[in-house]
Amino acid sequence: MASDECKGKSSWPELVGKKGEDAVEIIEKENPHVNAVIVLEGSVVTADFLCTRVRVWVDTYGVVTRVPIIG
């Protein structure tokens, strides 16, 4: 399934450099169909694609390091 088949906003480039907790709130407010999850850089995650998930990658300071996208 591709992100263009998912409902609502699918990418948040404006959140790179922001606090992860703030990013989660913004993502879930802007797209109520997703659950945003904070993931520490270097963590191992599954490769499956879910329209209901957005991973928010953060560094050890809790700052967003990658563009959060649906998947």
Image (tube, rainbow, N blue to C red):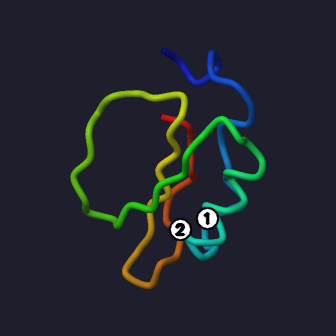
- The vertical placement of 10 against 65, above or below, is above
Q: Pointer 1: what residue?
A: 16
Residue in view at x 61 percent, y 64 percent? 16
Say which of 62 and 13 sits in front: 62
Q: Amino acid at mark 1?
A: Val
- The vertical placement of 64 against 7, above or below, is below
Q: Earlier in the sequence, mark 1 or mark 2?
A: 1
Relative side of 25 to 53, left or right = right
- The vertical placement of 31 against 20, above or below, is above
Q: Which mark is residue 61?
A: none
Q: What element does badge 2 sit on?
A: loop
Relative side of 14 to 68, left or right = right
Question: Callout 1: few (<14), some (14-19), or many (20+) C-alpha neighbours within 10 Å?
Answer: some
Relative side of 26 to 70, left or right = right
Residue in view at x 53 percent, y 68 percent? 64
Name the residue furthest right: 30
Q: Give residue 22's quadrant in the image.
A: bottom right
Question: Callout 2: few (<14), some (14-19), or many (20+) C-alpha neighbours within 10 Å?
Answer: many
Distance in Å between CA atoms under marks 1 and 2: 5 Å
Q: Are marks 1 and 2 in contact (CB under 8 Å)?
A: yes
Residue 15 image offset from top left, x and y in percent: 67, 62
Q: Amino acid at mark 2?
A: Val
Residue in view at x 58 percent, y 72 percent? 21
Q: What element does badge 1 sit on?
A: loop
Residue 68 image offset from top left, x and y in percent: 56, 50
Q: Pointer 2: what residue?
A: 64
Relative side of 16 to 65, left or right = right
Image label count: 2
Residue 12 image offset from top left, x and y in percent: 68, 50
